[in-house]
Image (cartoon, rainbow, N blue to C red):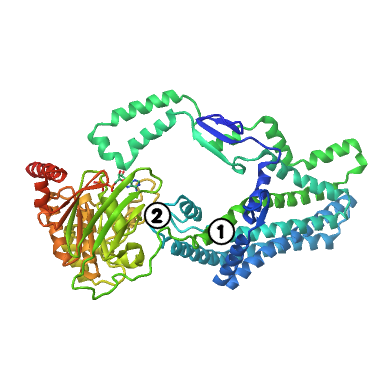
């Protein structure tokens, strides 16, 4: 990496941390700049000027209203809890200071003022009981609001995200918005935390104002007040000036290449995914040897987490000042005593110590919560702005099919007119100037070597992407003029790499028809047709088996005495490993379910049988052809010998261009690319059969 004059580098063991060189303004204060940027945006029309952005405020207001509507009582309890925090900290200051005063005065005068001491003591104990009770009660209500807010916003984000098309989901800005919502792996409480933090930040500012006013009143504005506040500020100020690692933007990378190599070898040695290769290729010795080599190269260089090393890297002076700052009241009073013995009283010392520590804690809370305000506002903004993101693929107005009684066929007519297509962010065309027409009900086979553009053509048909130029017509009208939902409802697409869904096997098949409840007989028929019945027979719970369950079981077994406990785990959340072929049969069953029940007008199967043996492949294509009944069918496969005989049209692609089209006889007679591919695949087919 080129050294950038604006950057500082710190080497921590194997890690290099890069951050901006410190500026005069501590980085912590940039939190306020960040906060400002949430409300003020640069005015594009007037350089150097900013305009107030209402959007953040509108989102914030909507957010608070929504949280309130989820549980007005719980919302008010949260507000009460925060007001209580302010009141109780003032009461605590009051009772503690009166207890201190009465105790020190009694000690100084050697005369017990029983009433005052007892009153302050009882007050302090009662306050403690009240604090604990309110906090317990608050926790109970808080949990309810937390769960409601969490799932409400998870559902809201789900609603926004699930309507996005592929192109929108691939957009880096949308990706980052979804990432920031933090719900990718599991439901997240980020929105509730944003609410709680915003409330507590407001509370902290009120609390500190109340505390300072109380202390001012207590010291009657004298020098004790100034001293108390100054002492309270020392440590928080140290923290702001020292700037922790997480108070600044930074990039960290491993600059010692032996460490990532060790990690790779470690993964190779222990990761489940490499188990088979490790054993069959005798990789054990190699892994051990190479791991040891990297270990030797690394020597004693520290590989611990960089954030742990960061703290250890601080200078002694900084550490001494920091420790001193924890409690400088006593040393300061000692100094004052050395200077002027009569100016110090024990009463003042204890009071200053006590009040400054209380305010000091409040200053810290303010620092922490202010740090989070802008990120909380960003979370709220992200969540609401996701709902405003428009799909990149524009929806059409026409229903599809336009006329249900259209003609006497149920297949789609497709025309590609000079279609060229480039994937977003790439320079090369995946398809170039492709033109062809598929008549309703035709069986079409697309052939071509790897990367010739076959799958891209299928993706354009369901508008996962739109052509970069040219036009696709469906039943004589431009494809974009139809409603997307209708186009997708009328097409059945079978690919080679459908994943197993983390649902029951039954649902994996029934989801071929997500818009209606299918009965068990229909599912069973689809399972048999797709050849997945053998998979079902293997499973303990039959079609109700969840194939790839979400893991919620956690265990901690110690010693031999836990056999009974181990039985509790039993067969919970057992993952069912399906072979590639079995997975493809499952996907085929889903598509057959779709063909059986839906008003499908186009079936496109894009190499759905790559993991099946030739016989299985032949059977599946036969079933698909039989079930297609008048629908337009497009098959993409490398082993097409048994199919092209039936094909009305064969499209032969090469490097994204359509180089030949016609039926089998015509293309064999043409003696071109198709003939070459046909003989090649036939040879491979015979070879694989004879193996
Ligand atoms: N998501 C993508 N982003 C960028 N480029 C892509 C993407 N998918 C495919 N391509 C590129 O587009 C071209 C056509 O790919 P396509 O998958 O359509 O070919 P194919 O004929 O179906 O290949 P195969 O027989 O291997 O499945 C290739 O050069 C490929 O690298």
The residue indicated by pointer 1 is 381
Whether residue 205 is visible here, answered yes or no, is: yes
* Label 2 residue SS: helix
Does label 1 point to a residue whose CB lies under 8 Å from ligand 1?
no
Along the line of sight, which residue is nearer the eye, 408 or 209? 408
Along the line of sight, which residue is nearer the eye, 90 or 264? 264
Does residue 370 lie above or below 55 as drawn? above
Does residue 189 lie above or below 238 as drawn? below
Query: Residue at point 75% right, 46% down?
Result: 233
In the image, taking residue 673 as reference, residue 40 lies left or right, namely right
Q: Position of residue 300 (x, y in %)?
A: 49, 25
Frontmost of labels 1 and 2 is 2
The residue indicated by pointer 2 is 167
Whether residue 498 is visible here, answered yes or no, is: no
Q: Quadrant of residue 490?
A: bottom left
- Cα separation, mark 1 vs mark 2, equals 22 Å
In the image, taking residue 414 as reference, residue 159 lies left or right, namely right
Along the line of sight, which residue is nearer the eye, 557 or 660? 660
- How many residues crowd mark 1 within 10 Å: few (<14), some (14–19), many (20+)? many
């Amino acid at each position: 990496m080129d050294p950038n004059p604006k950057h500082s580098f710190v080497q921590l063991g194997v890690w290099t941390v890069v951050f901006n060189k410190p500026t005069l303004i501590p980085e912590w204060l940039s939190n306020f700049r960040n906060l400002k940027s949430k409300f003020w945006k640069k005015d594009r029309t007037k350089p150097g000027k900013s305009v107030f952005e209402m959007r953040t405020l509108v989102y914030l207001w909507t957010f608070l209203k929504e949280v309130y509507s989820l549980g007005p009582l719980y919302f008010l309890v949260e507000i009460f809890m925060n007001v209580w925090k302010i009141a109780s900290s003032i009461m605590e200051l009051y009772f503690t200071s009166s207890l201190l005063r009465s105790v020190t005065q009694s000690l100084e005068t050697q005369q017990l003022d029983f009433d005052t001491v007892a009153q302050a003591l009882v007050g302090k104990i009662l306050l403690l009981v009240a604090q604990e009770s309110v906090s317990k009660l608050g926790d109970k209500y808080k949990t309810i609001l937390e769960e409601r807010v969490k799932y409400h916003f998870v559902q809201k984000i789900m609603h926004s995200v699930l309507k996005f098309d592929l192109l929108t989901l691939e957009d880096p800005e949308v990706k980052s918005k979804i990432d920031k919502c933090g719900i990718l792996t599991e439901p997240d409480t980020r929105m509730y935390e944003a609410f709680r933090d915003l409330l507590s930040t407001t509370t902290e500012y009120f609390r500190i104002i109340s505390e300072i006013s109380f202390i001012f009143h207590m010291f009657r504005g004298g020098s004790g007040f100034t001293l108390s506040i100054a002492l309270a500020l020392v440590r928080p100020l140290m923290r702001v000036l020292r700037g922790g690692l997480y108070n600044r933007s930074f990039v960290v990378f491993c600059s010692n290449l032996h460490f990532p190599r060790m990690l790779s070898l470690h993964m190779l040695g222990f990761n489940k995914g490499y188990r088979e290769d490790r054993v069959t290729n005798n990789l054990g010795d190699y892994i051990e040897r190479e791991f040891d080599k990297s270990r030797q190269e690394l020597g004693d260089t520290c590989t611990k987490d960089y954030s742990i090393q960061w703290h250890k890297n601080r200078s002694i002076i900084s550490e001494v000042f920091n420790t001193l700052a924890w409690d400088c009241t006593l040393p300061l009073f000692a100094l004052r005593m050395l200077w002027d013995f009569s100016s110090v009283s024990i009463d003042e010392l204890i009071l200053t110590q006590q009040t400054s520590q209380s305010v000091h804690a409040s200053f810290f809370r303010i620092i922490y919560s202010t740090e989070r305000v802008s990120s909380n506002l960003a979370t709220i903004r992200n969540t609401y702005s996701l709902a405003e993101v428009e799909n990149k693929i524009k929806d059409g107005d026409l229903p599809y099919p336009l006329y249900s009684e259209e003609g006497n066929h149920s297949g789609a007519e497709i025309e590609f007119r000079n279609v060229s297509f480039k994937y977003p962010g790439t320079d090369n065309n995946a398809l170039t100037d492709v033109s062809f027409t598929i008549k309703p009900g035709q069986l079409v086979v697309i052939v071509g070597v790897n990367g010739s553009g076959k799958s891209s053509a299928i993706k354009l048909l369901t508008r996962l992407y739109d052509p970069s130029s040219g036009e696709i017509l469906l039943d004589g009208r431009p494809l974009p003029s139809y409603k997307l939902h209708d186009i997708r409802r009328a097409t059945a697409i079978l690919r080679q790499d459908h994943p197993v869904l983390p649902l029951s096997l039954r649902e994996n098949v029934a989801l071929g028809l997500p818009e209606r409840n299918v009965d068990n007989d229909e599912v069973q028929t689809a399972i048999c047709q797709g050849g997945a019945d053998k998979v079902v027979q293997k499973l303990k719970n039959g079609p109700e088996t969840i194939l790839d369950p979400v893991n919620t079981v956690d265990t901690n077994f110690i010693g031999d005495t836990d056999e009974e406990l181990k039985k509790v785990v039993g067969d919970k959340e057992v993952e069912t490993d399906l072979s590639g072929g079995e997975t493809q049969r499952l996907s085929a069953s889903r598509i057959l379910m779709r063909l059986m029940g839906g008003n499908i007008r186009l079936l496109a199967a894009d190499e759905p049988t790559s993991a099946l043996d030739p016989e299985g492949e032949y059977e599946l294509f036969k079933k698909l052809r039989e079930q297609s009944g008048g629908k337009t069918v497009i098959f993409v496969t490398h082993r097409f010998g048994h199919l092209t005989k039936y094909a009305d049209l064969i499209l032969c692609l090469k490097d994204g261009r359509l180089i030949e089209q016609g039926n089998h006889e015509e293309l064999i007679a043409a003696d071109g690319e198709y003939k070459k591919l046909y003989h090649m695949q036939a040879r491979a087919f015979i070879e694989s059969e004879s193996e």
